[in-house]
Image (tube, rainbow, N blue to C red):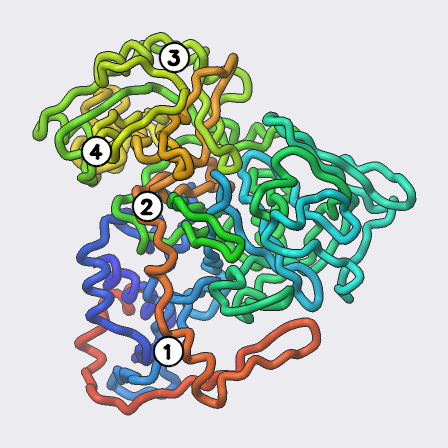
Amino acid sequence: NNLKQRIDNIISFELKPTIQLHPDFDLHRVLRDHSSSTSDPSPFISQDTRKSEIPFATDYSSYLQPVSNNSSEANISINTQRHYSRHTDAASAGTILGDNDHEFQLAPLAMGYGTHYATVYVGTPPQAQTVIVDTGSHLTAFPCAGCKNCGEEHHTDKHFHPEKSKSFEQLPCSKCVEGAHCSADRCVFSQSYTEGSSWSAYQGTDKFFMGKSKSLAHGSDEEGGIDPIASVYAIDFTFGCQTSENGLFVTQLADGIMGMSAHKSTLVQKLYDQHKISHNMFAMCFRHSLTVSKDGVTAGLMTLGGVDPRINSSQMNYALDTKFGHRTTRSSWFTVYVRGVMLYSDVNPDQIRNYSDKLKTDGGKYFRMPINEKTLNSGKGVIVDSGTTDTFLHTSLSRNFKAAWKTFTGEVFTNKEVKMTNEEIHGLPTILIQLKAFEARADASVDVFTNPGYVGAFDQIHSNDVLLAIKPETYMDYDKDKDNYTPRVYFTESSGGVLGANAMVGHDVLFDGENGRVGFAVSSCMYEDLVDDEEEALTKGNGGEVENEGDGMQLNVDCVLGPVIEKIECEETVRIDVCIMK
């Protein structure tokens, strides 16, 4: 019904008597995807005019093409030859009816030492750099040539060489930004982090875009792995050329860091400002990997400008971003409001269902801890921070949590290393975090007592609040060298808290800078599921070569239409009454 409504709207808007389906349109795939989808009830039409419509990657309306002639028939042509499709490529644009209304970019994320990182390409010609994706900060920086003791032997790439880029510009003192000050004719600045690491850098601007890792793109050396589709998103971007590092920045796998908070200087904001993406939002989807490598171990993906529901196994539920509209230069975090904390266990822990409904039907037990909401959300509040490996909650929760843990497990909770089997890990309770919903009332069509991701019967008054489940497989950190586990949830904060990367694992998390909300959906975060062999089309057709034109790139791949194999009357596909009404 959603698809039909969308097609009706498109046809009536175009005021064309006929339409022609794009040769790659697969009706069986559409019906299969939408019959099994558990995404929002209407992914194409916004239910609330106050909110921007999220550009879903599965909007099949991009396959519709107006027919230029006045034939009374609509031709459906199915092309047997594959082509390069935005629905399966890692970093390609999504556009509805050829406008710029729904552009987004997909890119893989790799596993680092507890954090996830992306590959970016900087300069002309592009040089690959890897950066931790960090919603807890806003600055982007990585080591440049001349950076001393900056861990090049530990990092995935060689230092960035500004002199090798013909588009690099070192900012003069008259153009310093973000609190940088002039020193030796350069804009210099530094950044320190709560865990003790820090770096110093000078400011520069260059061509910059996210893309595939070099291993995924079968590239090598500095210019390997350049994705011509991803390069469409190249913008002039200001970053820090690091001259010194200490702490974890020296030994981490990624070369540098990319701040992704809701600050005006971040990549997403700049992409939006320069009309490369049409919505000021992005989604991160983390999955955990026990293996790390300099070549990059894919462990999730990021969507810039929207969200891709194909990887999700539940609908996305939205928590209120409490700082939206009240951000400052020094405080630009995505902040949620924690309304409750629970421990939960049942006999079917892997089923994706509403937890309160599971408790009623499957049995099990849960414990809701007494909390002081004002204390728990004090100070900076509780932030969602992808750059922090672990989760940190207010110290006032410690006593009740430890008592509940003892009841559930019979053991004393500590953050010390323990020896456990896989079966014992699976038997540990799930930590449930109740987050204040974006909207006070749920949509009337949504059953918050049975649909996953809602608090449901756990809180009858706030039943549509978001319920974030942190499973033992994610909060128990495994050390394969020692073959033991360490609980990575800490009760040490004197104000507020941090939902770190381990709370995000297994979820597609939308950071919506337009509407002031943070969305959560249960997800496989399998980037590989979105990529198939359509990429081979780059080497087919007229050679599939990539042409360089100036500083940009173009694909030279012809679109080849197959023969028409079926025709249907236009009247069978179009609601004429809607067209007349419009």
Q: Give the labeled residue for mark 2.
A: 47
Residue name at image x 61 percent, y 47 percent: 154
Query: Is residue 19 visible to us here?
Result: no
Q: Is residue 574 left or right of residue 238?
A: left
Q: Give the labeled residue for mark 3.
A: 397
Viewer-proximal residue, 500 or 34? 500
Residues at discs 4 and 2 in contact (Cβ within 8 Å): no
Q: Residue 256, relative to residue 397: is it above or below?
A: below
The label number, if any, that marks residue 423 in the structure image = 4
Q: Earlier in the sequence, mark 4 or mark 2?
A: 2
Residue name at image x 28 percent, y 44 percent: 315
Q: Give the labeled residue for mark 1.
A: 66
Q: Quadrant of the C terminus?
A: bottom left
Q: Amino acid at mark 3?
A: Leu
Real-space Cα distance between discs 2 and 1? Answer: 27 Å
**Residue 333 occupies which quadrant of the picture?**
top right
